[in-house]
Amino acid sequence: MKKKILRIFRYVALAYVLGGAALYIFQDAVLFHPVTLKRNQLYDFPEPHREIDIPINGEDTLNVVDFEAAAPPRRGVVLYFHGNKKNISWYHKFIPYFTRRGYRVIMIDYPGYGKSRGKLTEQKLYNWALLTYKFALASTPADSIIIYGKSMGTGIAAYLASVRDCKRLILETPYYDFPSVVEHYLPIYPVRLMLHYRLPTAEYLRQVRAPVSIFHGTRDRIVTYRNAKRLQKLFKPGDELITIPNGKHNNLFQFPETLRKLDSLLLLP
């Protein structure tokens, strides 16, 4: 009996070690799900836009799509940092919600996503966000720039707003930090010691001077609503959490309350 228990324990221990090793080695494949596009592939977005490649070095190229505002008055620019799926093509469906209110939208693909090239690292995400801001600032004053992050992009957006001035920071389904998301799924592992990525939204939020608005659904099973409630504790006066009852991770724009509130934020002077 003891031998049987010991054998079972060894199997469990081996599975635990192998699972942890796989998470550590293949964490990029677990966390990020890019789709690469050929450099000569043309986007067929119906909205007026221009595509720009910004060479960083011999290996890295930042691909930017700049969508024109659809209606006057021209109110400013939204810097949109998307989630961990696919590429700009997947997220461009959200563009009209901003352009119809007079905003240009500048969206980038991260290293390895779409037509952007390079190895993805956390520091590179921050560096590319700063380049995007500099690109926007060349034609738009800081007080007319809204920084918007969705899912994975919320940590990048929060970082940028913590080091650069903007009109407002808007976060859709944000996480407290990256390890907290993975811990929710894998509580048996010392995730904070294993991950290469931190993206500590909470730390950056403490340093953001602009007003902050967070959208989060109560039925989000990918980045749980608890993350937003934890971030709410860091709010300064004027910041707000917009709770969408029954909202999930990828369907908040199907709720009228999301659209009404977003419209009201975009129309603020």
Image (cartoon, rainbow, N blue to C red):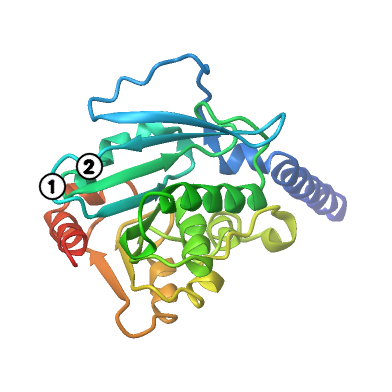
Left or right of 123? Residue 143 is left
Label 1: few (<14), some (14–19) or many (≥20) C-alpha neighbours in 10 Å: few
Viewer-side residue, 47 vs 54: 54
Element under disc 2: loop
Q: Where residue 18 sits: x, y (%)?
A: 77, 43
Q: Is any atom of residue 203 visible in this view?
A: yes
Hey, which residue is sitting farthest top in the picture? 40
Check if mark 2's residue and mark 1's residue have beta carbons within 8 Å.
yes
Determine the residue positioned at 57% across, 58% down. 178
Viewer-side residue, 180 vs 112: 112
**Where is 40 relative to 170, above or below?**
above
**Where is 261 relative to 208, above or below?**
above
Q: Which residue is mark 1?
A: 72
Determine the residue positioned at 58% across, 44% down. 31
Viewer-side residue, 221 vs 99: 99
Q: Where residue 5 sits: x, y (%)?
A: 80, 53
Hey, which residue is sitting farthest bottom in the picture? 237
Q: Which residue is mark 2?
A: 69
Determine the residue positioned at 59% across, 36% down. 111
Q: Quadrant of the C terminus?
A: bottom left
Q: Where residue 194 sits: x, y (%)?
A: 73, 55
Determine the residue positioned at 50% across, 60% down. 160
The part of the image, by quadrant, that contains residue 200 is bottom right
**Where is 141 relative to 99, above or below?**
below
Q: Is any atom of residue 248 visible in this view?
A: no
Q: Where residue 164 sits: x, y (%)?
A: 49, 65
